[in-house]
Image: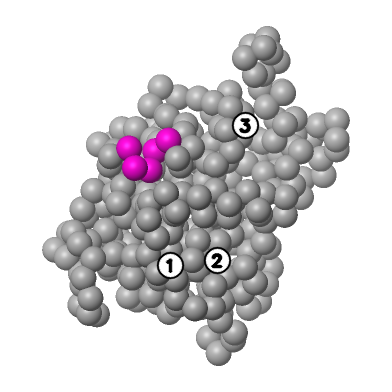
Amino acid sequence: MALTPSSWRPGLALRLLGLAPHYFHGHGLSFRGHGLGSAAHRSRVSLEMFVRDVLEPYLAPEQDLLDVGCGPGYLTRAVAGRVWSVTALDVSRGVLSCARILNPAINIDYRTPQDFFGSGRRVDIAVSLDVATWMGDGELTDLLDLVWASLRPGGCLVLRTCVRSDVSGPGPGPGQDAEPVGRSTLAAGQSRLAHSRGSRRGSPHCHPRQADHLVGLVEQAGFGSVLLHALHAPAVESGPQRAVAENAAAQNCLLVAIRRYDRIGGSDRITEAAAQSPPPPQRASQPAARG
């Protein structure tokens, strides 16, 4: 990018992103990049609508926001105008370089997880669209540990994820750990997060979880007041979530939780800050599960 003339950089960034099968998947793209501009435009518009219709109730002008798994940065750019600052994370430095070209803003800081986690920086809200769906239980537990440590007490976690609608169905899907995984160190967690995203970069798969199982993982990581809101189809445009939208055995959901002041045992672990959870978004139905 640094050696490319500035006027050519957006086109080059789109072509490089078009080599991956999941950023603009399903839009009829060719190797020469035909359709990349329109696909990028659809991604930008759909995520702006997602922020407006789903995320906006959880955002405030004074917040520092963490976007986990930002990819090309379309969600990052969509939320940047509604919060004080955005730190956007992705394991690929190449994708981050493209995101800086395609979705820049004065209050956006694009970083790798290794650059951010463990730096001591804190945020008020952490948002992730698809990363949790790509991960197995152990990888998701590591990610939740890292996010918990980076959120200020009472901070909000928002995940777009998938849950199984057949409650009696099988447990964790392919790529998920069947047994509980112990809490790892910060370095190990970052390594597994990078390996998870890298191993799925060629062909990401969506593995829905049962609602109670997902809520349990989030609660064990130190979050309380966990709610799952079913998302309507218009809120889901692309990525693994779209494939799940066509699967009768799965449902796209928005998970919202509050970071507790500490990790303690027992079922009643909701703090005073957690009791002040923001209302559900307008385009979400009644909660599908309650922690």
Residue 142 in percent (x, y) is at 43, 59
Judging by the rendered image, the residue that carries numbered circle 1 is 229
Q: Is residue 107 visible?
A: yes
* Quadrant hosting residue 241: bottom right
Judging by the rendered image, the residue that carries numbered circle 3 is 94
User: Is residue 118 shown in magenta?
Assistant: yes
Main SS, magenta residues: loop
**Residue stretch rendered in magenta on the structure:** 115-119
Of callouts 2 and 1, which one flags the residue occurring earlier in the amino acid sequence? 2
Residue sitting at 32 percent across and 55 percent down? 148
SS type, badge 1: strand
User: Depth-wise, is mark 2 or mark 1 nearer the camera?
Assistant: 2
The amino acid pointed to by label 1 is His
User: Depth-wise, is mark 3 or mark 1 nearer the camera?
Assistant: 3
The amino acid pointed to by label 2 is Gly
Decide which of 37, 266 is in the foreground and name it.
266
Taking the image as shown, residue 203 lies to the left or right of residue 186, namely right
Q: Distance between the residues labelled 3 and 2?
A: 24 Å
